[in-house]
Image (cartoon, grey):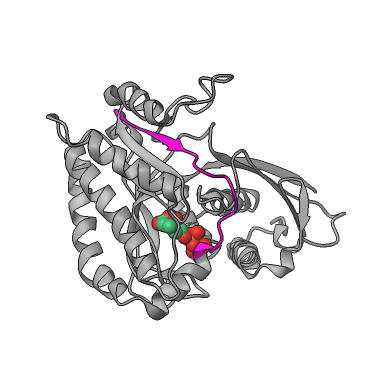
Amino acid sequence: MSKTITCSAPVNIAVIKYWGKRDEELILPTNSSLSCTLSQDQLQTRTSVSFSPTYTKDRLWLNGKEEDVFKSARLRNCLSETRRLRSEYEASLEKKGNSSVAKLSQYFVHAASINNFPTAAGLASSASGYACFVFALCKLYELPISVSDMSRIARTGSGSACRSLFGGFVAWEMGQLKDGSDSQAVQIAPETHWPEIEAIILVVSDAKKATSSTSGMQTTVQTSELLQHRISEVVPRRMKEIIHAIEQKDFKAFAEITMKDSNQFHAVCLDTYPPICYLNDVSKKVIELLTAYNSGPDGIKAAYTFDAGPNAVIYAPKANIKELIQFISFYFPPPRSNPTAYFPDPLKIFQ
Ligand code: DP6
């Protein structure tokens, strides 16, 4: 018996940032976070997983290149947890008297995954990658588990991946328990709740980031004093406020919190010792431009946010996107040879 499942998963871009772990192995965060899942076809990971009695070991290909599955504890965690759940499921079916249960947990798995956007450039590739891998494995093994359960497994691959299991506006509740069983993603609102919001991404650089999120947040937890203030006071308040803003579709409140949280995340990076600087001069210019754009008579019309890299993600109501693109293009003109190079279609929040 053999079987193949192919899935795709979108990226998510946080508006309240996750930065810091209280448990490195289980990937349990020091604060809750919240993100928007972006439309799938333009930024996605596509993964096929299969099993067959002819396979002699677990194998994985990333963007066409074979990786050693056993070198990555995170990949192993996701694979072994889904396999463990499958064998538990098989045992429970047998106990109920089902004598023809397929022993899928005994087969080796092959997985092949491709991204259609730059990997490790701060564009959330690990988030969609692990979300896709775990979702595909759960389908391959026919596990009768909820999406939040899947999000807990994806979390052990990469923290932010747990949020890509849902569409729309998604919170990762940090949880309190030591075993991580309450640290999972939940959907705050589907994309249909607020379809007017769109996102554009300004790719300032597609180079691989110098400091990975994993090692960067580790140094931050060890050295930043500002982080303590952020996790105990600022994020708990902002989580409530931004959820309220989303429920009320209050863009100005949503945007202000988003920009402030991005600023504080990068301040925390700078407060890390040795300091981490993800923003470059172009990113800072984008912040300056957006601040000027938002200081007109209409108030806040767009929100920037930057992850662990120099690329800007800008959230804005659909009605402002054309003007915003004209405004940005004026200061960063696209090459004459390819005038539309910078701005393909704006991204929608993905369901
Ligand atoms: C700045 O999820 O990539 O994008 O859990 O170590 O894999 P690991 O880190 P990762 O960190 C993402 C950090 C961030 C903020 C966010 O997405 O919330």
Magenta span main SS:
loop
> Does 272 appear above or below 46?
below
Is residue 216 among what the camera can see? yes
Quadrant for the C terminus in the image: top left
Tell me the quarter of the picture where residue 107 sits: bottom right
Q: Nearer the viewer, residue 274 or 187?
A: 274
Q: Quadrant of residue 329?
A: top left
Residue 3: image location, x then y, percent: 74, 45
Residue 14 or 278: which is nearer the viewer?
Answer: 278
Residue 209 picture location, percent across and down = 55, 56
Q: How many marks?
A: 0
User: From this viewpoint, is residue 166 visible?
Assistant: no
Q: x%, y% of residue 136?
A: 61, 48
Q: Is residue 132 above or below residue 59?
A: above
Vertical order, 175 against 47 (above or below): below
x, y (%) of residue 214? 51, 67
Q: For this rendering, which residue is in front, 328 or 264? A: 328
Left or right relative to 112: residue 15? left
Tell me, yes or no, whether the highlighted magenta stretch contains residue 197.
Answer: yes
- Left or right: where 351 falls relative to 339: left
Residue at image position (49%, 55%) is 161
Q: Which residues are drawn in magenta?
A: 196-213
Magenta region includes residue 346: no
Question: Splitting the image into 4 quarters, where does residue 235 fall?
Answer: bottom left
Q: Nearer the viewer, residue 305 or 3?
A: 305
Residue at 54%, 24% in the rendered image: 335
